[in-house]
Image (tube, grey):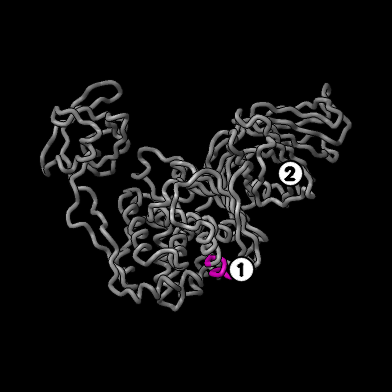
């Protein structure tokens, strides 16, 4: 059944989007409609229906139809209700949604633009299969551009009308409307569109050319592009960072003020690389649980170490391989990842499989104790795929061979997802059974991993700081100059001495503690010395003894012992 969506943004400063959905009931006595509760690629129940303000249904003559909300985000429209019924096959549903949250997985409308994220806006119908839905946009006349991967069927008129293959594709195609900057480039005869909203500070880089180099490298690395055209939608706004993958497009967020900083610029290119590679890994190659989607319930999978871990390994590697950074810069990024990993005690408690399965309640709902209880499948997943890359080198293979194997496996059965055992069989085919079992141990256990021993095989080593600094073993946050404990590190001094997240630190040895003091805390402390802390906890002033201790060892740098061997391994 084909549905027609009309999206009207009349007064963008109110952040209200008016949507009407028209179709036919084809003999059904009632139809069930729903608004998704989550977005593929972002594993958290966001309950988008909480933003719906009004909802009404009518037939083609404008006569009201009976409807009732049956669950959160679900409505049943009846055509045979004793009081409000119709013989008309046609219907229209009208509803309003408040859209004022600028992230890659929500919609945002204000007087400068509209970013429309499908799952947060477009009703689906569980009673009918939606085929080739059409969507029309009406918006203020001063706005001149619509950027989306949806098929333009406007016929060159003044209307903005688009078509999707099905409901899943409609949800999977973000839309940018406004007066944003647009550009593009060609790779292998295919168009790649760029939409830039927001501002950047002056910088020395050519974003379009560098993005093109990323696209060229990754598409040639895999060997083919599975789309007819591709769209990058980017929002440059202060303090924003992130991305969300889609089959033929991506939405990116970045702080455009930071491009003059080389480290930040490489982070931007890695983000582009990460989300673009998802075109293959996740949107096509995927865990079996991730499609077809149940948009109203959690879709649990233990394989996000593949979806995000593999992608997190190759995103920075592709930037290096594409010639956009030096080997030393790549190793600096790698060192940052290892440093983060070693600062997370939660790696001792959650395997990659557990981290993946619990993404809905752990990674996407972090709290004060998250670092003590779990590990990111992005972070650890990327590091274990580095180790797999090194092991595959021993068999004359590399991650490139693994990705090609995954891609060929997907093409042989595109409607089915992948299971862990199938992945391990691909690894075994490229190496041996022992390597496959070794890798499975990495993703299923919490045993400490000897990264240094593996890195030595390709000519790399760790250099640690000679002496760890004294620490309270806590992370702090500030309100003006006042100091509060944000989180407590497992087995650190604060943990052992009973500090709580939320405590306000008033004084150390009865001397007032303010933000500047905390920023220089390690230089003020003496090892094996006990200090008197004055705290405010839940409105009560208390005092407690605190003995600082040395923090975890700190990775200083990754050293190169054989540059030729390193380059040979990482360039393959």
Side of 88 where 293 appears, left or right: left
Question: Which of 343 and 29 lies nearest the eye of the viewer?
Answer: 343
Residue 296 visible to the viewer? no
- What span is in magenta? 217-223
* Residue 473, numbered circle: none
Q: Is residue 114 above or below residue 341?
A: above
Residue 444 visible to the viewer? yes
**Tag 2 residue:** 160
Q: CA distance from mark 1 to mark 2?
A: 31 Å
> Dot 2: what SS?
strand
Residue at 63% x, 68% y is 188
Residue 471 within the magenta-colored segment of the rendering = no
Quarter of the rendering containing residue 479: top left
Side of 197 where 312 appears, left or right: left
Quarter of the rendering containing residue 564: bottom left
**Tag 1 residue:** 224
Main structural element of the magenta stretch: helix, strand or loop? helix
Mark 1 or mark 2: name the one nearer the start of the chain: 2
User: Is the C terminus in the top left, top right, bottom left or bottom right quadrant?
Assistant: bottom left
Q: Is residue 6 above or below residue 450?
A: above
Side of 289 where 555 appears, left or right: left
| Crowdedness near tag 2: few (<14), some (14–19) or many (≥20) residues, C-alpha within 10 Å | some
Residue 279 in the image, given as x and y percentages of width and height = 58, 58
């Amino acid at each position: 059944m084909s549905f027609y969506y009309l999206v009207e943004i009349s007064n963008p400063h109110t952040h209200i989007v008016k949507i009407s959905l028209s179709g036919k009931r084809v003999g059904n006595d009632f139809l069930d409609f729903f608004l998704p509760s989550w977005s593929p690629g972002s594993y958290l129940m966001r309950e988008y229906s909480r933003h719906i303000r009004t909802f009404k249904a009518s037939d083609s003559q404008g006569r009201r139809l009976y409807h009732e909300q049956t669950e959160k985000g679900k409505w049943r429209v009846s055509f045979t209700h004793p009081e409000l019924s119709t013989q008309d096959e046609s219907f229209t549903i009208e509803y309003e949604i408040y859209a004022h949250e600028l992230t890659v997985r929500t919609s945002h409308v204000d007087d400068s633009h509209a970013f429309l994220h499908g799952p947060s806006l477009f009703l689906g119908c569980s009673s009918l299969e939606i085929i080739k839905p059409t969507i029309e946009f009406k918006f203020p006349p001063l706005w001149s551009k619509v950027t989306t991967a949806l098929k333009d069927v406007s016929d060159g008129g003044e209307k903005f009308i688009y078509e999707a293959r099905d409901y899943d594709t409609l949800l999977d195609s973000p839309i940018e409307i406004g007066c944003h900057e647009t550009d593009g480039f060609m790779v292998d005869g295919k168009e790649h569109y760029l939409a830039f909203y927001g501002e950047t500070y002056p910088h020395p880089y050519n974003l379009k050319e560098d993005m093109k180099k990323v696209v060229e490298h990754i598409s040639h690395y895999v060997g083919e592009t599975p789309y007819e055209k591709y769209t990058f939608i980017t929002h440059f706004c202060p303090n924003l960072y992130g991305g969300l993958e889609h089959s033929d497009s991506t939405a990116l967020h970045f702080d455009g003020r930071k491009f003059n900083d080389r480290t930040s610029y490489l982070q931007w290119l890695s983000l582009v690389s990460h989300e673009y590679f998802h075109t293959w890994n996740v949107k096509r190659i995927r865990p079996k649980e991730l499609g077809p989607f149940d948009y109203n319930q959690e879709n649990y999978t233990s394989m996000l170490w593949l979806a995000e871990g593999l992608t997190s390994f190759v995103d920075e590697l592709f930037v290096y391989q594409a010639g956009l950074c030096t080997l030393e810069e790549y190793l600096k990024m790698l060192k940052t990842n290892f440093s983060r990993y070693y600062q997370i005690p939660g790696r001792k408690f959650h395997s990659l499989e557990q981290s993946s399965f619990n993404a809905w309640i752990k990674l996407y709902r972090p709290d004060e104790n998250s670092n003590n209880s779990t590990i990111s499948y992005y972070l650890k997943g990327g590091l274990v795929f580095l180790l797999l890359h090194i092991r595959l080198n021993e068999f004359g293979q590399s991650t490139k061979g693994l990705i090609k194997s995954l891609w060929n496996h997907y093409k042989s059965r595109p409607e089915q997802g992948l299971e862990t055992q199938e992945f391990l069989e691909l690894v075994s085919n490229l190496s041996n059974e022992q390597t496959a079992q070794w890798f499975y141990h990495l993703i299923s256990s919490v045993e400490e991993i000897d990264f240094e021993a593996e890195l030595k095989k390709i000519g790399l080593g760790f250099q640690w700081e000679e002496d760890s600094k004294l620490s309270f073993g806590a992370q702090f946050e500030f309100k003006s100059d006042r100091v509060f404990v944000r989180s407590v590190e497992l087995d650190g001094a604060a943990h052992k001495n009973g500090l709580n997240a939320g405590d306000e630190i008033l004084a150390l040895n009865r001397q007032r503690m303010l933000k500047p003091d905390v920023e220089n805390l390690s230089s003020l402390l003496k090892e094996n010395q006990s200090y008197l802390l004055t705290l405010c906890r839940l409105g009560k002033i208390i005092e407690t003894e605190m003995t600082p201790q040395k923090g975890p060892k700190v990775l200083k740098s990754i050293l190169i012992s054989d540059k030729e061997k390193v380059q040979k391994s990482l360039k393959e």
